Image (spheres, helix red, strand yellow):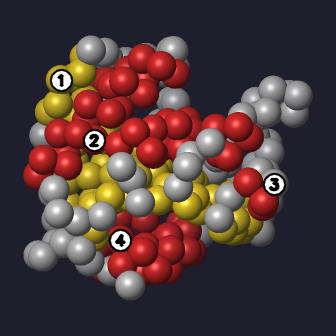
Amino acid sequence: MEIMTPRGRALVEVDEVERARMLLVLTHGSAGGVDAPDLLAVRDAALGVGASVARVTQAFRVAGARAPGSPARQDEAWQIVVDELRKRWPDVPLVQGGRSNGARVACRTAKAVGAASVVALAFPLHPPGRPERSRADELRGAGVEVLVVSGDRDPFGLPDPADATRMVVLPGEGHDLKKNPARVGEVVADWLQRHLS
């Protein structure tokens, strides 16, 4: 599926379940893709609890860029994509999320798109070695419940648990969360079931 934004084409891969109870919209980090092990594990786990899943390759990545550019322009394009997806699933709760930069955009736009909650995988609290450049305000400002799943070896830092609704720190994991992606999926599935009940 292709959705046009002011930044160009965004591509959406959809996995549907019959009688979806929720729509989960996921996206990648700055230089990554929607086939990252943790995103695939979350997709599989979400399908197992009755959520249809849309994995979005944002326009900047489709265009070949490794950085999203201006947060305002990235958020504008993201909201257009989510608004289009909501036309297809208008009557089910929306949860949005992503890994790293995708977690940031999900937090920044959650209220604007009407998300029930956010799944933030490897939320990048600060650039590596630059703790003074904290992005905690994006997490705190989501305006909805936020699940953060991070590894204890993440060089981008760990958010303060008080800044999220739920914080799960996985031992031995780095920023890529690829040592045990199935565990990431289990944590997210538990979170989604909470929103489905």
Disc 4: which residue: 46
Q: Which mark is residue 95?
A: none
Q: Which mark is residue 4?
A: 1
Check disc 4 and report its element: helix, strand or loop.
helix
In the image, taking residue 158 as reference, residue 37 lies left or right, namely left
Return the x and y of residue 162 as percentages of the image width and height: 78, 60
- The residue under the point 47% across, 19% down is 72
Return the x and y of residue 74 as percentages of the image width and height: 43, 23
- The residue under the point 15% across, 57% down is 89
User: Which of the two discs, 3 and 4, sits closer to the camera?
Assistant: 3
User: Which of the two discs, 1 and 2, sits closer to the camera?
Assistant: 2
Q: Could you tell me the amino acid type at mark 4?
A: Ala
How far apart marks 1 and 2 lie (CA) works out to 12 Å
Which is nearer the N-term, disc 2 or disc 3?
Answer: 2
Return the x and y of residue 193 as percentages of the image width and height: 42, 80
* On-image quarter of the N terminus: top left
Check disc 3 and report its element: helix, strand or loop.
loop
Disc 3: which residue: 160
Check disc 2 and report its element: helix, strand or loop.
helix
Q: Is residue 173 visible?
A: no
Sort mark 1 into few (<14), some (14-19) or many (20+) by Cα contacts within 10 Å: some
Quarter-of-image position of residue 197: bottom left
